[in-house]
Image (spheres, rainbow, N blue to C red):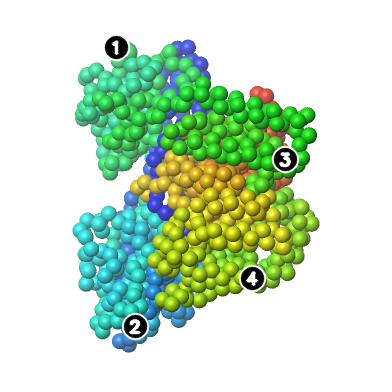
């Protein structure tokens, strides 16, 4: 179904990664030095000159702790240049003008931007007399050249250089010409920068230019009469508007409703000219050089810092006296321009360099100081640190093999832990204690005993196939229940316990709804596939080729009669003559895929259904066809469709009546329909649309009855952002997806939207450290419940002609090198299958050859700024990113299997 750019929806980053760094045993502190040569790399979409990583062996806690390496220079104890990736805010404005043309009835709306970028106006209209908050597409005659239709509700028009400005910094704008006597009540729009995927709105809402008086009261209305008060409230709100990732919601449903009964006022249309401030964030790279020398006179350690950061640079720092790594205040004297911060740390303003570019400073530390933790604070309250943790320099020769998970604690008088230096203004929640190990071990022992007993060769062979599947399903349900307990606030189980349960129930037998574990999914359509009217016939001709590439499942488009041609607004569920072809053509296509060994998923839209007629109040909520439901089948809490059912068990989709799955007659009809599709059409499983709209327990009911081979739900949700950048920690996001899977009893998987979003940020910004979580595991659903994670990088909503959340351009094969070598069930988008045919075929062949499956083990071996690497099942090694990596050769021999632009895959030989 339709999705929006959930990934760029808000935006920010709170870096709290734990970099995987190899340790070295160092019996004593030995001097060394490094010479680093700058090179140019690409960060996000900007080029900058930085100093590369060198082969510096270090130990690490939750900060980066640097040990020493011997060198002939007796004075320099430590020397390193640290790369500082940050964003710079560039200010500009959006201007909106409404001008009268030569004829008094002709008007022109102009929307422009003074900042550089690939700007696109995403817009639609509201017609007079139409009830509801939905957008409609404008008439053809007012669409500017180059406009592209987005589904059936919006238009996207690229901004072009203004003829009124000249030079490299020319403004970009678009003009919409219309007649005021038309049926258009309002023009709605948002502005999108396609270079960054960011959207410009006001507090997540769309701009509204009213052309009739009854729409002039919304707080997102743009009119000259409001002047500085474009939106009611203080003018302070305007100064805080920024370019963030907020994209319009489904079908852009955030506008104020226009009542069809309100009479049009006779007040004439008035022109206006409004400027709004806009702030765009541009990636910038600076560096910090740090060296440590021993003062021959005082025997103190002198820490020298030098940076090219502009403006005032404050070092927020402290010292550690032992292995506990607890922050402490050093003895006086302190450097100039130093102040004490809350009796926990010092803040020192670095001195400007003589040439005026950058700053520097010297910190004198006593011999008993074991470590020097610090972070940097800039003029605009931006904090720079080590991926969310503090920078840390080890000054003690007794520190060996520090565990990477050990953290530096900064405690106040209450004993609460404070976060990294970037967040030390606010205390964080105290860390939860680990669950009782004995209790956990006993539970795992019991489950292992159960699995071992039923899977022993003698006993297992005496079971019928049905009994085997029943036992395995019960174990899967037990694992799902255990997972639910683990993910609850009480945290009865450890994450390791759940993964051990997952490993314990491995078996080659097929489980209803989750397959064998070796599936590779191909989405068999895009957003334009319906236009030929013969898609089933075209897809049928490609069955043999898709099978030869290595796919085991193909996902078909929605089969039912639909108000929208793409199929996601179903009407008569039993009418399978759609824009993709006839019911007979669908059956033939399914049979052909079965002949070549590929199973077929049907796209089941169960959340909503379009009505056939209106009720006595003029509301569309009466259904026809074989399932002739009335308004009792519609949820009661969607005001658009006035249902008489119960309240929704999920989120409402406002474009059509949301079905009330709590009604017995509704569930019985849906179960009968799914069984009919399985038997008569031949579908092997389901792709379930918009499962956020209803409880996962109903999905379990449908799967238990229809017994699909494989099922996957589309649980689409916004990731976490702060201040314009994606957060490092996306546990809350993947938790919501896992909760839905658990509600189904583990009978269905879910698309791993978390992994897609994190891949976006990692590849766009050259921040590959994002691809490992705080425990050194994959950061998406695949890191928590791999057997239920369906990984993907693109689909018909995010890519194709919609492009709501398009994968970073030119980096698609890095994405596929990741998902096609990792655990989980990978899904490949139709458009990419043939565009990257040879590379994808090679990856598919390797996955099948090495028997990589949804529960394969993974060891992340490197996760740095410019490279991510992992070893899977000790059979396959891979890396993505421009940085260098070679797999370990201590116990295995590796051979390059596939290599492409910024990715490389090895196999054991």
| Secondary-structure class at tag 1 | loop
Which quadrant of the view contains residue 83?
top left
- Look at mark 3 in the image and give the residue it sits on: 467
> How far apart in space, not on screen, are marks 2 and 4 (Cα)?
42 Å
Q: Which mark is residue 579?
A: none
* The furthest residue to the bottom: 103
Report the residue at 41% width, 43% height from top.
727
Badge 3 or badge 1: first in the primary sequence: 1
Q: Are marks 2 and 3 in contact (CB under 8 Å)?
A: no
Q: Which mark is residue 297?
A: 1
Along the viewing direction, whichever of 792 and 724 lies nearer the viewer: 792
> How far apart in space, not on screen, are marks 1 and 4 (Cα)?
91 Å
Q: Position of residue 195 (x, y in %)?
A: 45, 57
| Secondary-structure class at tag 4 | loop
Report the residue at 32% width, 64% height from top.
94
Of the two numbered discs 2 and 3 in the rendering, the one whose residue sits closer to the viewer: 3
| Secondary-structure class at tag 3 | helix
Along the viewing direction, whichever of 756 and 75 lies nearer the viewer: 756
């Amino acid at each position: 179904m339709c999705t929006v750019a959930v990934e760029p929806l808000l935006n920010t980053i709170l870096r709290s990664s734990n970099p995987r760094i190899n340790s070295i045993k160092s019996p004593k502190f030995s001097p060394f030095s490094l010479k680093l040569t700058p090179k140019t790399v690409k960060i996000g979409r900007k080029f900058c000159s930085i100093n590369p990583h060198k082969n510096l062996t270090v130990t690490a806690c939750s900060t980066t702790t640097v040990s020493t390496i011997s060198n002939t220079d007796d004075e320099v104890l430590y020397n390193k240049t640290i790369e500082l990736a940050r964003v710079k805010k560039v200010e500009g404005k959006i201007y909106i003008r409404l001008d009268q043309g030569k004829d008094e009835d002709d008007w022109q709306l102009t929307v422009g931007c003074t900042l550089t970028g690939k700007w696109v106006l995403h817009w639609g209209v509201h017609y007079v007399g139409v009830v509801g908050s939905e957008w409609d597409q404008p008439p053809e005659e007012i669409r500017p050249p180059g406009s592209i239709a987005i589904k059936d509700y919006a238009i996207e028009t690229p901004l072009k250089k203004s003829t009124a400005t000249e030079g490299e910094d020319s403004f970009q704008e678009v003009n919409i010409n219309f007649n005021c006597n038309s049926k258009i009540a309002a023009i709605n729009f948002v502005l999108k920068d396609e270079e960054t995927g960011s959207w410009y709105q006001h507090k997540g809402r769309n701009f509204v230019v009213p052309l009739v008086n009854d729409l002039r009261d919304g707080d997102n209305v743009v009119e000259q009469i409001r002047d500085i008060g474009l939106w009611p409230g203080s003018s302070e709100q305007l100064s805080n508007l920024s370019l963030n990732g907020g994209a319009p919601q489904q079908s852009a449903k955030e506008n104020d409703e226009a009542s069809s009964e309100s009479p049009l006022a006779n007040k004439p249309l008035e022109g206006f000219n409004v400027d709004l401030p806009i702030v765009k964030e541009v990636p910038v790279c600076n560096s910090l050089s740090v060296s440590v020398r021993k003062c021959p006179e005082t025997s103190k350690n002198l820490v020298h810092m030098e940076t090219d950061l502009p403006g005032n640079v404050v070092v927020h720092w402290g010292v550690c006296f032992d292995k506990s790594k607890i922050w402490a205040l050093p003895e006086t004297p302190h450097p100039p321009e130093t102040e004490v911060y809350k009796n926990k740390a010092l803040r020192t303003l670095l001195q400007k360099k003589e040439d005026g570019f950058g700053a520097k400073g010297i910190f004198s530390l006593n011999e008993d100081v074991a470590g020097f933790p610090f972070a940097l604070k800039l003029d605009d309250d931006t904090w720079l640190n080590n991926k969310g943790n503090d920078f840390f320099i080890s000054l003690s020769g007794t520190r060996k093999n520090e565990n990477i998970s050990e953290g530096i604690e900064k405690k106040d008088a209450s004993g609460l832990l404070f976060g990294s230096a970037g967040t030390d203004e606010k205390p964080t929640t105290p860390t939860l204690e680990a669950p009782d190990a004995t209790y956990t071990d006993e539970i795992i022992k019991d489950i292992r005993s159960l699995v071992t007993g039923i899977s022993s060769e003698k006993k297992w062979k005496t079971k019928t196939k049905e009994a085997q599947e029943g036992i395995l399903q019960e174990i899967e349900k037990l694992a799902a229940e255990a997972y639910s307990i683990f993910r609850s606030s009480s945290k009865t189980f450890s994450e390791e316990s759940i993964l051990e349960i997952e490993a314990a129930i491995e078996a080659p037998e097929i489980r209803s709804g989750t397959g064998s574990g070796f599936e590779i999914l191909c989405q068999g359509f895009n957003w334009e596939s319906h236009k030929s009217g013969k898609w089933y016939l075209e897809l049928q001709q490609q069955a043999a080729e898709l099978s030869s590439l290595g796919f085991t499942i193909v996902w078909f488009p929605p089969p039912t009669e639909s108000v929208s041609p793409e199929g996601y607004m179903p009407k008569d569920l039993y009418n399978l003559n759609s824009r993709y072809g006839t019911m007979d053509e669908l059956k033939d296509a399914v049979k052909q895929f079965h002949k070549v060994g590929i199973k077929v998923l049907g796209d089941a839209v169960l959340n909503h259904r379009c009505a056939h007629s209106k009720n006595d109040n003029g509301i569309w909520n009466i259904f026809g066809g074989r399932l002739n439901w009335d308004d009792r089948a519609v949820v009661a809490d969607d005001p658009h469709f006035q249902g008489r059912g119960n309240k929704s068990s999920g989120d409402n989709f406002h474009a059509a009546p949301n079905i009330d799955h709590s009604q017995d007659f509704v569930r019985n009809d849906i179960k009968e329909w799914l069984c009919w599709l399985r038997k008569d059409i031949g579908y092997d499983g389901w792709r379930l649309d918009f499962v956020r709209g209803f409880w996962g327990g109903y999905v379990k009911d449908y799967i238990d009855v229809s017994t699909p081979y494989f099922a996957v739900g589309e649980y689409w949700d916004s990731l976490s952002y702060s201040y314009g950048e994606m957060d490092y920690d996306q546990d809350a996001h993947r938790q919501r997806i896992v909760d839905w899977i658990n509600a189904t009893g583990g009978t269905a998987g879910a698309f791993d939207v978390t992994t897609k979003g994190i891949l976006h940020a990692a590849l766009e910004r050259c921040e590959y450290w994002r691809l490992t979580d705080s425990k050194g595991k994959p950061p998406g659903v695949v890191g928590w419940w791999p057997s239920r994670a369906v990984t993907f990088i693109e689909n018909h909503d995010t890519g194709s002609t919609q492009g709501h959340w398009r994968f970073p351009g030119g980096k698609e094969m890095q994405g596929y090198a990741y998902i096609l070598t990792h655990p989980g069930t990978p899904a490949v988008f139709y458009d990419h299958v043939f565009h990257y045919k040879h590379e994808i075929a090679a990856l598919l062949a390797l996955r099948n050859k090495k028997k990589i499956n949804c529960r394969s083990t993974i060891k992340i071996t490197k996760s740095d700024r410019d490279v991510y690497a992992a070893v899977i099942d000790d059979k396959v090694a891979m890396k993505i990113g421009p940085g260098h990596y070679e797999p370990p050769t201590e116990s295995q021999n590796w051979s390059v299997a596939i290599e492409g632009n910024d990715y490389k895959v090895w196999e054991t030989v």
